[in-house]
Image (cartoon, rainbow, N blue to C red):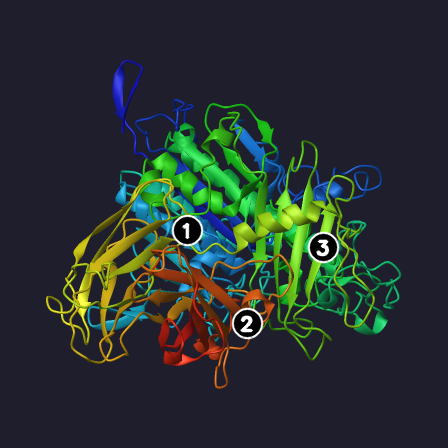
């Protein structure tokens, strides 16, 4: 980049997309070493980062872990209420406040997003959403052990790198990285490094790795696949710039600032991540501040919020008089204070739980102290950007991957319950964005962690290409610059698709929730949640869907569930206000979407002679393969198709097809039509296939459709009717039986007439069917819903109609071990109007039933 200044040209290196990601509750990670920060020069010129053509401003993302609201300025309570009264006047409050520098909004131009939410409030899923802009039910990473599922060729750094950015990630990537993967480097197996990162320094976090993500003992993997181990005594009395200092926040911060200072010219992207409060797998049970921030005497704890230990008494007994939370939460024991027999002693007494305190109180204080080193890191990074004279062409983003309960609603006994919850403490997290040239202000509209990746793509000028892959997030540019954006969302999705949660107080549970703002009308804010329980040993009705509804305007601490739960065993359906019905429908639309392309199967009677209609066969035998896109696209989508022989041969049994389908914006269905060539030879049914490939948009979830050419020459003469089969992917959320809930999976079973009815005029054909038969492996009400509630029904063919559909709703599942399942659809009777419609079967019916059984296969998609 060349900048004109003072009548002469100065060459200044452009830094682009420096993403500093700090993982852990209030990660204590510094982004630079004070010894390496050059003196700040005069302020550089402000660049309009949103201009078109795109100037490709630098992007610095600082992503913390487990950071709740209310930690960036005056200390607030966990749901962001102002510090007032005794809370604000607490002795020692200033000494505890962790981020005074960032809280001062250095150099102005900061936008604080007050209503920012995490899709899945857990480390690994949240990070996957940050990188992809996708909900976790789309990117496949739903818990801390599924990082290996992420397709790292579809993360936003690939698009930034392709746009000329220098990309870097420093710190924690995804839990359990490198997932046991290796790459051959010079003939030697080395740890795996994801593609298109120019700088890489990531925690090794295998389950068995020593010092996994610890503060003083840890292992890093760099972009050259080298393994670097660091170890020093816990909390040594070392200064920030001591060369022997190995406090992980400081080490990673130095690496991040080095990337700013010494990276080659051109746009850059880097990410810094670290361990903080308590992120589970091998992290300390409480955040460990840098030694320079540990007080000699224990600092005071902070007052608990009104929902602290909800449902429990201080003496450890239960208080369930008005308890209205889901059963899994009700089963958690109350929190208790430490007694004299539980005193902990060590060389860092300021960090240990104290007698007479709840453990959560001390953890919360330690998190504040741990933030101090992070605050120093932010200051050093800003200084480095100023020294390079690129501060005012750099977008800085500060946020967290999830919150932390600290005992709210009794949550905190085990890793999953500390942060993976549907309540504000877990999912409502800070978001600050510095956009050069604007004023300091607050933004109240709803945002989500899935919004950041498309926002970065927009500033890099690659948003259209990035969105072509199908993303859930929205570009935040209009909100950043304060535009009106009247169509901006009124609700965000929060979800947890956990299965087999570990820990002594965990249960197999999943929840889906909707948080609204100014909806259904201005000034209203609601939280609606559905929780699915899957533990029959603990709960009497494991498939019962428990509902919660909170008015966040009058009840910000979520104490009063307006969908009151019944105390009956098993519990009865809740009595919800009418607003819950609308919210449930909106939740289902967000929750059940499966963005993909799929092709169905097709079955057709072959006819008598080629593809030429005749008096006896007035309908051309054409196999119609329906190709569907599960969600409409904002842009045109193309997908290729081509046919292949099976037992049927192209040229003699059907005409081959090869081409491209074009979905215009908003279209979701297209057809591939294959001409079938009939004959009068009695022979078995034959098959061929049509395959999809080369999608320019969503991925292809089911790419092969099977065509069945039904022989009608060996059957008795006359009009015949038959039923085909179907295949469908199950989707997620197995056993969800609540009324009004939906799923994207429907099996469409086709019933086909060999010839249309010509005489008598106006006659119709009715065909009775039955769903389910002995030997089926799919179970009604567990894997699919019986049509009409009984599994029996009738399809009607109007004059000239040759096919009809039986739609059967599939109930999704999330258990890999279940495998594929099937059920049977049988035709039991057929009759023509104007004739006899008595009891019949098979070829004694009119029309004759010559193919009476079809099979629906439910494909398991959970690995």
- Nearer to me, 614 or 329: 614
* Horizontal and vertical percent position of residue 838: 49, 75
Gap in Å between the C-alphas at discs 3 and 1?
30 Å
Gap in Å between the C-alphas at discs 1 and 2?
42 Å
Identify the residue at the far bottom of this view: 775
| Mark toward the start of the polypeptide (1 vs 2) | 1
Residue 104 badge: none
Provide the secondary structure element on which disc 2 rests: loop
- Nearer to me, 738 or 802: 802
Q: Quadrant of residue 120?
A: bottom right
Q: Nearer the viewer, mark 3 or mark 1?
A: 3
Residue 548 badge: 3
Q: Quadrant of the C terminus?
A: bottom left
* Horizontal and vertical percent position of residue 655: 14, 62
Q: Is residue 520 left or right of residue 466?
A: right
Q: Quadrant of the N terminus?
A: top left
| Mark toward the start of the polypeptide (2 vs 3) | 3
Q: Is residue 169 left or right of residue 542?
A: left
The residue pinned by badge 2 equals 791
Q: Quick check: 228 above or below 559?
A: below
Q: Residues within 10 Å of mark 2 (few under 14, many from 20)?
A: some
* Horizontal and vertical percent position of residue 164: 26, 41
Q: Are marks 2 and 3 in contact (CB under 8 Å)?
A: no
Q: Quick check: 752 above or below 850?
A: above
Residue 132 badge: 1
Q: Nearer the viewer, mark 1 or mark 2?
A: 2
- Nearer to me, 301 or 818: 818
Q: Are marks 3 and 1 in contact (CB under 8 Å)?
A: no
Q: Residues within 10 Å of mark 3 (few under 14, many from 20)?
A: many
| Mark toward the start of the polypeptide (3 vs 1) | 1
């Amino acid at each position: 980049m060349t900048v004109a200044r003072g009548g002469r040209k100065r060459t200044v290196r452009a830094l682009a997309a420096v993403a500093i990601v700090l993982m852990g509750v209030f990660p204590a990670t510094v982004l630079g070493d004070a010894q390496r920060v050059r003196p700040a020069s005069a302020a550089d010129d402000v660049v309009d980062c949103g201009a078109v053509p795109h100037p490709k401003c630098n992007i610095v993302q600082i992503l913390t872990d487990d950071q709740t609201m209310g930690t960036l300025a005056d200390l607030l309570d966990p749901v962001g209420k102002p510090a007032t009264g005794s809370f604000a006047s607490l002795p020692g409050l200033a000494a505890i406040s962790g981020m005074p520098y960032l809280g001062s909004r250095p150099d102005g131009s900061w936008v604080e997003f007050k209503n920012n939410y995490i899709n899945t409030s857990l480390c690994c899923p949240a990070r996957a959403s940050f990188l992809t802009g996708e909900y976790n039910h789309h990117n496949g990473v739903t818990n801390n052990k599924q990082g290996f599922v992420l397709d790292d060729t579809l993360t936003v750094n690939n698009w930034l790198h392709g746009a000329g950015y220098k990309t870097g990630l420093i710190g924690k990537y995804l839990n359990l990285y490198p997932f046991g993967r290796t790459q051959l480097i010079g003939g030697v197996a080395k740890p795996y490094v994801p593609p298109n990162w120019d700088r890489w320094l990531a925690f090794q976090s295998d389950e068995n790795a020593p010092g996994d993500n610890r503060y003083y003992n840890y292992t890093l993997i760099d972009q050259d696949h080298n393994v670097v181990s660091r170890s020093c005594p816990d909390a040594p009395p070392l200064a920030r710039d001591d060369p022997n200092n190995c406090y992980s926040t400081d080490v990673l911060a130095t690496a991040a600032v080095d990337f700013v200072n010494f990276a080659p010219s051109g746009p850059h992207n880097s990410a810094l991540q670290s361990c903080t409060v308590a992120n589970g797998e091998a992290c300390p049970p409480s955040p460990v501040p840098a030694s320079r921030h540990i007080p000699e005497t224990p600092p005071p704890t902070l007052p608990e919020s009104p929902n602290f230990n909800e449902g429990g008494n201080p003496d450890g007994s239960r208080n369930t008089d008005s308890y209205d939370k889901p059963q899994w939460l009700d089963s958690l024991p109350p929190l208790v204070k430490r007694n004299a027999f539980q005193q902990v002693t060590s060389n860092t007494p300021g960090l240990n739980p104290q007698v007479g305190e709840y453990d959560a109180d001390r953890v919360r204080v330690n998190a504040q102290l741990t933030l101090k080193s992070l605050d120093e890191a932010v200051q050093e990074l800003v200084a480095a950007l100023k020294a390079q004279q690129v501060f005012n062409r750099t977008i800085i983003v500060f946020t967290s991957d999830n919150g932390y309960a600290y005992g709210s609603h009794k949550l905190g006994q085990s890793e999953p319950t500390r942060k993976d919850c549907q309540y504000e403490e877990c999912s409502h997290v800070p978001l600050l964005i510095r956009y050069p040239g604007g004023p300091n202000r607050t933004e109240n509209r709803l945002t989500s962690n899935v919004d950041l990746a498309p926002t970065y793509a927009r500033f890099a000028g690659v948003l259209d290409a990035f969105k072509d892959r199908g993303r859930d997030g929205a570009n935040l540019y209009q909100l950043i610059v304060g535009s009106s954006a009247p169509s901006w969302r009124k609700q965000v999705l929060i979800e947890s698709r956990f299965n087999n949660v570990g820990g002594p107080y965990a249960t197999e549970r999943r929840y889906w929730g909707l948080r609204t703002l100014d909806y259904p009308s201005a000034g209203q804010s609601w939280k609606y949640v559905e929780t699915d329980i899957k533990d029959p040993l603990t709960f009497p009705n494991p498939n019962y869907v428990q509902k919660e509804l909170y008015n966040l305007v009058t009840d910000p601490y979520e104490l009063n569930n307006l969908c009151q739960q019944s105390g009956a065993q098993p519990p009865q359906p809740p009595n919800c206000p009418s607003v819950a019905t609308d919210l449930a429908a909106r939740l289902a639309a967000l929750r059940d979407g499966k963005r993909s392309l799929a092709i169905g199967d097709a079955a057709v009677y072959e006819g008598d002679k080629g593809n030429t209609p005749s008096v006896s066969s007035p309908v051309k035998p054409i196999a119609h393969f329906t190709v569907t896109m599960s969600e409409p696209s904002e842009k045109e989508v193309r997908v290729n198709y081509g046919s292949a022989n099976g037992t049927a041969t192209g040229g003699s049994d059907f005409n081959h097809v090869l081409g491209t389908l074009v979905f215009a914006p908003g279209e979701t269905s297209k057809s591939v039509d294959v001409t079938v060539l009939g004959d009068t030879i009695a022979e078995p049914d034959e098959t061929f296939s049509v395959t999809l490939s080369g999608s320019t948009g969503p991925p292809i979830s089911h790419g092969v459709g099977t065509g069945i050419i039904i022989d009608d020459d060996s059957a008795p003469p006359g009009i015949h009717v038959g039923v085909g089969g179907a295949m469908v992917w199950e989707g997620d959320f197995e056993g969800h039986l609540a009324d009004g809930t939906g799923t994207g999976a429907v099996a469409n079973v086709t019933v086909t007439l060999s010839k249309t009815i010509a005489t008598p005029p106006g006659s119709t054909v009715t065909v009775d069917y039955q769903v389910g038969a002995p030997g089926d492996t799919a179970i009604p009400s567990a894997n699919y819903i019986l049509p009409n509630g009984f599994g029996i029904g009738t399809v009607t063919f109007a004059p000239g109609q040759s096919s009809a559909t039986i739609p059967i709703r599939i109930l999704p599942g999330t258990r890999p071990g279940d495998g594929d399942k099937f059920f049977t659809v049988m035709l039991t009777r057929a009759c023509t109007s104007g004739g006899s419609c008595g009891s019949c079967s098979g070829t004694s019916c009119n029309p004759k039933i010559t193919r009476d059984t079809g099979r629906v296969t439910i494909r398991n998609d959970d690995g």
